[in-house]
Image (cartoon, grey):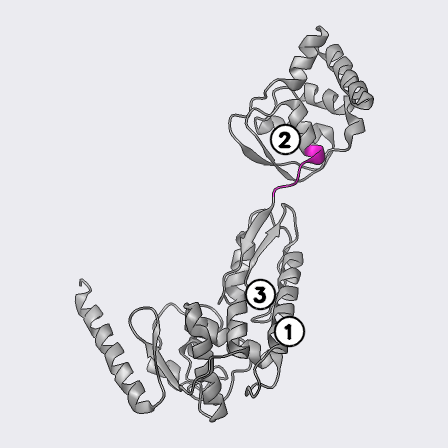
Amino acid sequence: MRRGLRRAGAALLVLTLLAGAGAWQALRLYQAPGPLAAPAQLVIPRGGTEAIAAALQAAGAIDDPRVFALATLATRGEGPLRAAEFAFPPGASVAEILAILRHGRPVQRRLTLPEGLTTWQIAALLAKAEGLVGEAPALPEGAVLPETYAYQWGDDRAALLRRAEAAMAQALAESWAVRAEGLPLASPREALILASIVERETALAEERPRIAAVFLNRLRQGMPLQSDPTVAYAAGNGVPLDRPLSRADLEREHPFNTYRLRGLPPAPIAAPGLAALRAVTRPAASDELYFVADGSGGHAFARTLEEHNRNVARWREIERRRADATPR
């Protein structure tokens, strides 16, 4: 209590000398509401009190950098001023600003990496993330876990990616450790590859274990997976395809063309989320071998080719009706 009074007294003395006025006038300068009209997040630079005062004045948070500088000197026993991004309330006084710079929590920014993105798309998100610095290193496909990651202004892109890689390694290990018995998958990497395909096949969480079961059943029987997303990945060389698949795409000899080749492709085609990893390692109990879009955002599943062909015919009819209804 006495220490706080001594510090306040020191601040008051310095401000009195600065103001050339009485003690009450100096205290008013220190505690009076500042000019900041609305809440603001401000990046406080490195470089000492002068640079910080200049940045605060330029942002409209203080009126007189001399008052701020001398108040900082008078209260230096409270701790150093930190360079980071801070949130300031409207009308923050010099006293409030100094308390925030010394003891406030820096702004926590967030970057969301959605499920199903390729490394090309993830790199684009990182490049646009405000406040991150440094180059993002090249990553193998499927290496990071889709999630929302907190960071602070000035954090390194490479460091954030290392966190996302570690999160994927942990999620994959945990999913593999509780996998169902008898899966036709030889390693966690094969689970990762299949999970990336499941992720790209459906946006419906409730469908993932069922779609995973279809692919696993096909692997057991030596059938090609016949997954359109793998063909699209091959056609776009890892960049999202901006056109429908063609017959030439389906017939092209390519390691990722699962219409032409049996088994899994050589690598993931995207970053699967935790739900897709769990779907592959704990699939639904099913003997289904086929699925096709049903027109409602989901899929129609089938055990036999005859049943599947009926579902395909219904889907093509839906597509035809939609095409007829589209204004030309």
Does 76 appear in magenta?
no
Which quadrant of the figure has residue 28? top right
Nearest the eye: 316 or 304: 304
Q: CA distance from mark 2 to mark 3?
A: 37 Å
The residue carrying mark 2 is: 55
Q: Position of residue 65 (x, y in %)?
A: 67, 22
Q: Residues within 10 Å of mark 2 (few under 14, many from 20)?
A: some
- Tell which circle, 1 or 2, labels the residue nearer the N-terminal end: 2
> What quarter of the picture does the N terminus occupy?
top right
Q: Amino acid at mark 3?
A: Leu
> What quarter of the picture does the C terminus occupy?
bottom left
Inspect this view and state whether residue 261 appears. Answer: no
Left or right: residue 117 versus residue 84 is left
Q: Position of residue 51 (x, y in %)?
A: 69, 31
The residue carrying mark 1 is: 173
The residue shown at (53%, 52%) is 128
- Tell which circle, 2 or 3, labels the residue nearer the N-terminal end: 2
Q: Which residues are magenta?
A: 101-107
The local secondary structure at tag 2 comes to: helix
The residue shown at (18%, 66%) is 325
The residue carrying mark 3 is: 145
The local secondary structure at tag 3 comes to: loop
Q: Amino acid at mark 2?
A: Ala
Q: Amino acid at mark 1?
A: Ala
Q: Residues within 10 Å of mark 3 (few under 14, many from 20)?
A: many
Left or right: residue 238 versus residue 298 is right
Q: Position of residue 161 (x, y in %)?
A: 63, 60
The local secondary structure at tag 1 comes to: helix
- Tell which circle, 1 or 3, labels the residue nearer the N-terminal end: 3
